[in-house]
Amino acid sequence: MRRNKAVAEDIQQLNTNNDIAAALWINFREDPAQSFYPLHGHAWGEFIYAFNGMMEVKIGQIDYITPPLYGIWLPPNVQHSGLNRTDISHATFYIHESLCVGLANQPGILLTNPLVSSLLQHLKQYPTEVSSGEHQRLLYVLLDQLKQAQVMGSYLPHSQHPQLRHILDYLHQHPEDNSTLQHLAARHHLTERTLARYCQKELRMSLNEWRQRLKVINAMSMLKQQISVENIAFDLGYANASAFIQMFKRWMGYTPDQFRKMHQVNQRF
């Protein structure tokens, strides 16, 4: 993966899974922040789901970044690499190309349903032998559910434009920064109008929308770690919890507490 100078030089390279044990196979990993998977590919499609944290998967010039409740779908034989900016707990579900009929031919974001989240939580919490009938039946149910999932574009797109990329990298590291578009542009020797134009061209959305999505991703991860709503609001740059709750509900359709309770129910599946 090409990495800009804003990423620490001591970034850790992780081992890819090159010996996949079955036509349907699932792997659970805990990866540290500032780590990456080098460019690789194989005859298995991959569904990557983050329980906590964020993983960025790069295919060509496109970055796919996904929050919890979404997952990244990679068809077989697609060369890709991965970057973890934060600590991350994730599952990777491998599907051999012979079983990928009915799944998308193009990579993208899959909007999953609660059953997918529950199945993944159950498989993580109660590991069984790969060859066992129970394990394989659950994987086939998971496969059927993924075939019904909605395919979307990147939830939080990135950019290869040097100045815009530096701004996005900064906001990843400082989600609490609520500087105006004008101030962010000035710091990087741009006009507000030029920065707005770069965002529409590179991200297909305004910088404000991109920042809201980033806050939602960070909030979901912190909610699942049982951090209080008040502390999350403060960490994300809100003056009070009410403003944060309104933002989260506007984007997700339910309050932070409702999201937390839903996650706790899924864990008890």
Image (cartoon, grey):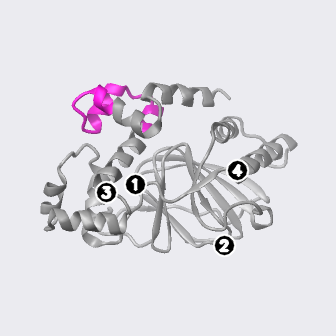
Point out the tag, 3 or 1, that comes first from the N-terminus.
Answer: 1
Q: Are marks 2 and 4 in contact (CB under 8 Å)?
A: no
Name which residue lies at 55% across and 43% down: 69
Q: State the residue position of label 4.
A: 148
* Mark 2: amino acid: Asn
Q: How far apart are the two marked residues, 3 and 4, measured between alpha carbons?
A: 30 Å
Quarter that holds the N terminus: bottom left
Residue at which label 1 appears: 85
Q: Is the Cβ of the residue at disc 3 closer than 8 Å to that at disc 1?
A: no
- At which x and y percent is residue 261? 53, 25
- Res. 165 in view: no
Q: Which mark is residue 147?
A: none
Disc 3 is placed on an element classified as loop
**Residue placed at 28% from the left, 68% from the top?**
198
Residue that mark 3 sits on? 206
Dot 2 corresponds to which residue? 77
On the image, the x and y values in percent for residue 79 come to 58, 73
Q: Position of residue 178 (x, y in %)?
A: 21, 45
The amino acid pointed to by label 3 is Ser
Q: Is residue 265 visible?
A: yes
**Which of these two is toward me, 90 or 77?**
77
> Which residue lies at the image location 13% right of the left edge and 61% below the top edge?
187
What range is drawn magenta here?
220-244
